[in-house]
Amino acid sequence: MFEQIERVPGDAILGLIEAFKKDTNPQKVDLGVGVYRDAQGNTPVMRAVKEAEALLLKNETTKTYIGSHGDPRYGQAILPLVLGASSPVLEAGRASATQSPGGTGALRLAADFIATQLPGKDVWVSDPTWPNHLGIFPAAGLTLHKYPYVDAENRLDFGGMLAALKQIPEGDVVLLHACCHNPTGFDLSREQWQQVLEVVKERDLLPLVDFAYQGFGEGLDEDAYGVRLLAENLDEMIVTSSCSKNFGIYCERTGCLIMVAKNAEQMENVRSQVAIVARENYSNPPAHGGSIVSEIMNSAELAAIWREELTEMRDRINGLRRQFVEALKPYGLDEKYACVAEQRGMFSYTGLTPEQVDRLRDEYGIYMVRSGRANVAGFSDENLPYLAKAIAAVN
C-alpha cells in the first residue's frame, strides 16, 4: 500500500538549517530559525532554568502521569502570568488552564475543541500569519480564511484588518497575535486593541489569541495588554500560551491552553470537554518543562532571576533592531528599513523580495525565509556590517 504514497517538500525552515550547515562561507549568517540567540550565536539555558532543574533533580519523587490538564501548579503559575495577578477573570473562576505540548499543542487542542464543540464555525487568521496556523486548523477539519494585516508598503494595514473583521460572519473565530506578531513583528497599539474589542463584541466573534512571545515585546505585563483587555470585557475567549521563548525551554515542549467562559459553572463544562480533547490527542502532556516553570514562579528568588534574564534578552533584540537600521544609513537605506526598528519580537518582516532573499543566500551566505522574514536574534555586532553591505548590494 505504501507505494501509493507521494513525497512532499520538507519544511522550508528545516531545509534552511541543513543548507546553512553545509555552507562553507566563513561569514555565513543564519536568520531563519525561530530561536533566541545570544551575542555568541548560542541559544543558552537560562540560569533560572538551570537552578530550577537542579532543585527538581534533588527533590523529585515520582515520574507518574500528571493528568490530561497537566500539573495544577503549572496552571496556577501560568494563569496569573497571562491574565494578571489581580485579574477579575481569575477571581470569578472564569478561566481554566490545560498544560500542553508547546504552544503548537495548545493550538491543536483549541482547533479540536472548536471543531467538536462549535461545529460550523470558521477560523480567520492574519495575512500573513505563522505558517503552522495554516496547517493546524484545516487538519482539525476547520475552514480557514484570512484578513489583511500588512500592506504593499510593508506596513501594518490596520484599516484593512478592521474593515475585514467587520465582515466576518457572526460567531466565527478570529485568531489574533497577542504581541511580537510572527512573522511580521508589527503589533497593535492599545488604541487599536480597543477598536478590535469593539468589533469582536459587535460581531459576537470568538477571539483565539496566540501568545507565544510574552515578555519579548515591551514587557511581561505590557505584552499581555490585549489578552487582558479582551478577557475582562468578553464572556468567552481562548488563549494559547507558550513557555518556549520566554523560558528558553524550546525542546521541553511546554505550553498552555487557557479557556475563558462567562462564569465558573460554564467553565467547568468547557474544562471537561477540553480534558477529553487532550486525552484523545496525547493523553498526558510532558511534565518536565511545566515543572521547571512552576519551580521558578513559586520561588521569589528564581522568578527575579528569570525576569532579569528575560529583560536582557528583550533589550538585546530591541537594541539590535535599532543597530540594524543604523548600519544601513551609510547606504541610504535606513528610511526604507526603518520599520524594523518599530517592530517587536524576534521576527521582522524586512520587505526583502524572494529574489533578494535568494541572492543573499547564494552570494553572501545569509539565510532567511523567502518571505523576507528574518530572525533579529541572529543579528550581532560582528555580522551587522556584513549584513548591511549585502542588503545594500541586492537592493
Image: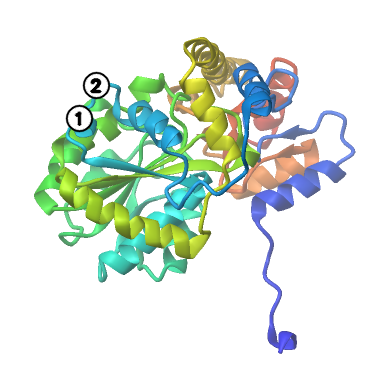
The location of residue 304, given as percent across then percent down, is 49, 11
Quadrant the N terminus occupies: bottom right
* Foreground residue among 107 and 27: 107
The location of residue 394, given as percent across then percent down, is 67, 37
Spatial separation of the CA atoms under disc 1 and disc 2? 8 Å
* Foreground residue among 166 and 268: 268
- Note whether 200 is above or below 90 in the view shown: below
Crowding at mark 1 (Cα within 10 Å: few <14, some 14-19, many 20+): few
Does residue 146 appear in the picture of this structure? Answer: no
* Foreground residue among 311 and 188: 311
The location of residue 260, given as percent across then percent down, is 25, 44
Q: Are marks 1 and 2 in contact (CB under 8 Å)?
A: yes
Marks 1 and 2: which is nearer the front? 1
- Note whether 178 is above or below 101 in the view shown: above
Label 1 SS? helix
Q: Amino acid at mark 1?
A: Glu
Quadrant the C terminus occupies: top right
Q: Residue at x 70, y 51 (%)?
A: 14
Q: Is 256 situated left or right of 330 in this image?
A: left
Residue topped by disc 2? 86
Q: How many marks?
A: 2
Label 2 SS? loop
Residue topped by disc 1? 91
Q: Is 183 situated left or right of 97 in this image?
A: right
Q: Tell me, for residue 385, which label it has, or none.
A: none
* Foreground residue among 225 and 332: 225
Q: Amino acid at mark 2?
A: Ser
